[in-house]
Image (spheres, helix red, strand yellow):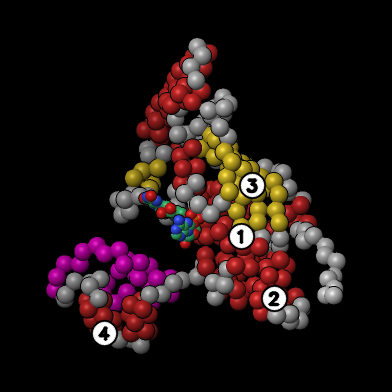
Amino acid sequence: MQEFEHLERPQVPALDEILGEPFNVLDDGFVRVVDYMGSDDSIVQAARVSYGKGTKKLRQDRGLIRYLLRHHHTTPLEMCEIKLHVRVPMDAWRQWIRHRTANVNEYSTRYSIAIDAVQRTLPGEWRMQATSNRQGSEGLAEEELGTHFTAQETELHELSRRVYIERIEAGVAREQARKDLPLATYTEAYWKIDLHNLLHFLYLRMESHAQYEIRAYAEVIGNEIVKRWCPVAWEAFMDYQFHGMELTSLDSRVIAAVAAGAHEKAIDIAIEEEILPPRGEKITRNMEREELEEKLRRLGMRIPWE
Ligand SMILES: Cc1cc2nc3c(=O)[nH]c(=O)nc-3n(C[C@H](O)[C@H](O)[C@H](O)COP(=O)(O)OP(=O)(O)OC[C@H]3O[C@@H](n4cnc5c(N)ncnc54)[C@H](O)[C@@H]3O)c2cc1C
């Protein structure tokens, strides 16, 4: 009969230390770890089932995790799970809940009275609409305008709460009484996800294009929680994915030409691939070209058509 060794439950003392402790986010939100399963070791253990047992020196374990991340061999990362308790304004939660690969239980405002907390914006925090990116923001509103918006917001929040409580006290069903509460109202949820899908969430939501409010949560989850929980996988994720750079075949061809000093050739490629208009025509906006320009800047290379 096959013999099995006794197993110890994987534990991460650095994460155990902060279990249940809330990390504050925004003005009244938080994230706290409720429970977890697995660690960097669990990733290695799962990968070794795939690859067969090898030597278990620390350096090799680290190398294995880094290999997995580099090559998108992601199933070993799914062996690690984490359960968070989060308190988030409903507008950020609406973006958060789009990540379908988590298991969720949200506070019910059909069953209970809505949480009496709304995310407030200080006078110096009103962001202006970006002109270069339809989804984003850039710059801040003037102080005077910000003060006006904050005062108006307070009035609106107070009114909506008053109306809500009046409906509740008159016996209106909670499920209907809530309909005019603002999206700034905080909600709470238990959110459980595996490490692979959590890193995908963090890749999208820690990124500079993600909205500030959800980014604030993602940064806390990444830098305060995942970094403690699976430090080797976190480091590999930062190196290979978050701070990495994806090159399309067009990018590679243009970059190779620029590196060789063949700037006219780089321009020819860009024209041929229609990210740049023919010579002599006005250069109009093109998202793919702008993304390539950003990559050239990061590489410290000249943009040949500028
Ligand atoms: C900056 C930004 C802007 C955005 N703007 C918009 C917007 O304007 N409008 C909008 O509606 N959404 C928008 N989103 C949401 C976005 O389209 C995704 O819905 C969200 O980021 C969740 O990503 P996901 O589906 O990859 O994650 P998850 O749901 O966690 O899924 C992870 C992965 O699992 C796989 N998967 C999960 N479910 C399925 C399925 N049913 N079928 C096939 N594969 C599946 C996919 O490979 C997926 O990438 C935006 C997101 C970001 C980050």
**Amino acid type for the residue under numbered disc 1:** Leu
Name which of mark 2 and mark 3 comes first in the sequence.
Answer: 2
**The N terminus - image quarter:** bottom right
* Residue 48: mark in rendering: 2
Find the distance from the CA under tag 2 to the CA under tag 3: 28 Å
Q: Are marks 2 and 3 in contact (CB under 8 Å)?
A: no
Q: Can residue 29 be seen in this view?
A: no
User: Residue at the location (71% across, 66% down)?
Assistant: 42
Badge nearest the viewer, 4 or 3: 3
Which residue range is magenta in the image? 280-306
User: Residue at the location (30% across, 86% down)?
Assistant: 262
Name which of mark 4 and mark 1 comes first in the sequence.
Answer: 1
Q: What element carries label 1?
A: helix
Q: Are marks 4 and 3 in contact (CB under 8 Å)?
A: no
Question: Residue 181 magenta-drawn?
Answer: no
Farthest residue toward the top? 170
Q: Are marks 1 and 3 in contact (CB under 8 Å)?
A: no
Residue identifier under label 3: 84
Quadrant in which ligand 1 is drawn:
bottom left
**The C terminus - image quarter:** bottom left
Would residue 39 appear left or right of 9 to someone viewing this image? left
Residue identifier under label 4: 265
Name which of mark 1 and mark 3 comes first in the sequence.
Answer: 3
Name which of mark 4 and mark 3 comes first in the sequence.
Answer: 3
Residue identifier under label 1: 195
Assess disc 3: are there few (<14), some (14-19) or many (≥20) residues with their C-alpha within 10 Å of its C-alpha: many
**Amino acid type for the residue under numbered disc 4:** Lys
Find the distance from the CA under tag 2 to the CA under tag 4: 47 Å
Badge nearest the viewer, 2 or 4: 2
User: Residue at the location (45% across, 34% down)?
Assistant: 183
Assess disc 1: are there few (<14), some (14-19) or many (≥20) residues with their C-alpha within 10 Å of its C-alpha: many
Find the distance from the CA under tag 1 to the CA under tag 3: 12 Å
